[in-house]
């Protein structure tokens, strides 16, 4: 019985061992199948890697060959560019060298001419210095003192005058065209009353033109006897109309101490232009000596009324381009009322200033000063024509220096 149990247990144990052996065999076989599949996959992958390796190696060889070919081609291009550039620069340098040699030969050939030009320049400079010395001797380029000479209205005793006084003006240097003068009184009778800004007419039987700025220039400030300022080149005068009678310089010869009433009647030259509208005379005071007019005087140029002025205007300019009206008279019959009579007129400085401030650059010194003063016809004369008939003109105001401006 007991042996049967033992036999049964042994058989069960054997069955279990057998089962485990079979199960283990199956697992081993399955594992072997898995290993076979893995081996096949590894072999396939190795084959693929070999193919990729061959393909990549081939591509690398192709790309390397292409890059090498491009580098060789670029190398050839760079070498050729360097050669071409060197050839161009070599040609330029050779051309420059040839040009320098040619210029050197030309300069050697022209050296005598340059030396001759240098001598000519030196001679011209000496000639110009000599000419400058000659010009300095002219009244038109005289060097003045540090003074400004002003003519202003001022009552003296029972009369009224325009008094020329000498005033120090440290704010600017003297003009090379200003004539140095000494203290002097210049009489110019004026009517009292009326608007101080309006033009004042003075008519009387006197034929003597009161002395003013032109008188100063003609006498160099009382340092010499009277000499016509045009003839001494202290000022320059121009007329745009043909002259029929007299000389143009006689307009500035009005104040002449050798002329008395009798000599004026007998010998006064009657300056008269042809009939021409807008006929004018212009007086140039120089580029560095300008005039600021506060009044002016005119003398009739005939023993009778004749072609006395009736319409005229006094103009001022610094450049002969822009002109400012200093005074204008229309239908004024003061001239010609007696032989060679004199009339004086005030200038409205504020009106002149209002015109100028939109045209010229202003300084405290220049203000309303001009280089050119012109008397221009603005209408017919006493006989209905356009003659400019005048026996003399004089200005009153101040000489202004422009050297330091």
Image: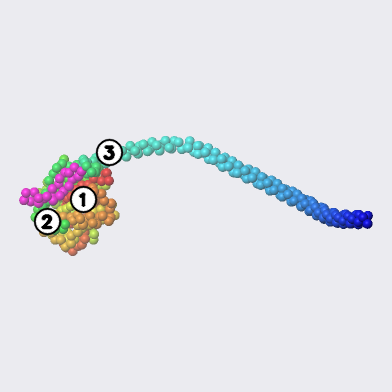
Observer-side mark, 2 or 1, equals 1
Q: Quadrant of the N terminus?
A: bottom right
Which residue has dot 1 on it?
Answer: 292
Indicate the position of residue 217 as horizontal and vertical percent values. 19, 45
Does the magenta portion include 270? no
Q: Earlier in the sequence, mark 2 or mark 1?
A: 2
- CA neighbours of label 1 inside 10 A, class few (<14), some (14 to 19), many (20+): many
Instruction: Work out whether residue 396 or residue 205 is closer to the camera in this orientation and state it.
Output: 396
Residue at the farthest front position: 1
Q: CA distance from mark 2 to mark 1?
A: 21 Å
- CA neighbours of label 3 inside 10 A, class few (<14), some (14 to 19), many (20+): few
Q: Quadrant of residue 193?
A: bottom left
Residues at circles 3 and 1 in contact by the CB criterion of under 8 Å: no
Q: Residue at x 39, y 37 (%)?
A: 118
**Element under disc 2:** strand
Which residue has dot 2 on it?
Answer: 202
Indicate the position of residue 227 as horizontal and vertical percent values. 17, 44
Magenta: predominant secondary structure element? strand
Which residue has dot 3 on it?
Answer: 133
In the image, 106: left or right of 243?
right
> What's the magenta region?
148-169
Q: Quadrant of residue 401?
A: top left
Q: Quadrant of residue 176?
A: top left
In the image, 131: left or right of 249?
right
Indicate the position of residue 162 as horizontal and vertical percent values. 13, 50
Residue at the farthest bottom position: 384
Indicate the position of residue 182 as horizontal and vertical percent values. 15, 41
**Element under disc 3:** helix
Above or below 231: residue 243: below
Q: Residue at x 16, y 53 (%)?
A: 295
């Amino acid at each position: 019985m007991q042996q049967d149990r033992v036999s049964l247990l042994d058989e069960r144990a054997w069955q279990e061992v057998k089962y485990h052996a079979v199960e283990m065999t199956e697992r081993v076989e399955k594992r072997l199948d898995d290993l076979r599949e893995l081996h096949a996959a590894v072999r396939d992958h190795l084959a693929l890697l070999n193919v990729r390796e061959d393909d990549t190696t081939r591509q690398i060889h192709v790309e390397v060959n292409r890059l090498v070919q491009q580098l060789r081609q670029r190398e050839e291009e760079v070498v050729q560019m360097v050669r071409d550039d060197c050839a161009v620069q070599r040609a330029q340098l050779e051309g420059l060298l040839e040009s320098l040699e040619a210029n050197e030969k030309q300069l050697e050939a022209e050296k005598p001419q340059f030396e001759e030009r240098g001598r000519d320049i030196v001679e011209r400079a000496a000639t110009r210095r000599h000419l400058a010395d000659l010009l300095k001797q002219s009244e038109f380029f005289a060097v003045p003192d540090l003074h400004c000479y002003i003519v202003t209205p001022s009552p003296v005793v029972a009369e009224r005058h325009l008094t020329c006084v000498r005033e120090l003006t440290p704010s600017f240097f003297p003009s090379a065209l200003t004539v140095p003068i000494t203290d002097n009184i210049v009489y110019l009778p004026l009517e009292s009353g009326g608007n101080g800004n309006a033009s004042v007419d003075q008519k009387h039987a006197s034929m003597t033109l009161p002395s003013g700025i032109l008188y100063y220039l003609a006498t160099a400030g009382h340092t010499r006897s009277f000499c016509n300022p045009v003839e001494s080149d202290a000022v320059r005068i121009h007329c745009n109309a043909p002259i029929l009678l007299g000389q143009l310089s006689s307009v500035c010869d009005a104040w002449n101490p050798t002329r008395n009433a009798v000599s004026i009647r007998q010998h006064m030259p009657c300056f008269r232009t042809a009939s021409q509208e807008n006929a004018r005379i212009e007086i140039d005071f120089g580029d560095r000596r300008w005039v600021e007019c506060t009044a002016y005087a005119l003398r009739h140029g005939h023993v009778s009324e004749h072609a006395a002025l009736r319409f005229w205007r006094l103009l001022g300019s610094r450049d002969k381009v822009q002109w400012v009206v200093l005074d204008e008279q229309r239908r004024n019959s003061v001239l010609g009322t007696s032989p060679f009579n004199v009339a004086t007129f005030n200038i409205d400085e504020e009106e002149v200033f209002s015109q100028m401030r939109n045209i010229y650059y202003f300084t405290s010194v220049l203000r309303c000063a001009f280089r050119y003063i012109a008397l221009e016809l603005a209408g017919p004369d006493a006989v209905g024509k356009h003659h400019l008939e005048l026996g003399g003109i004089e200005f009153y105001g101040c000489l202004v220096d422009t050297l330091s401006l």
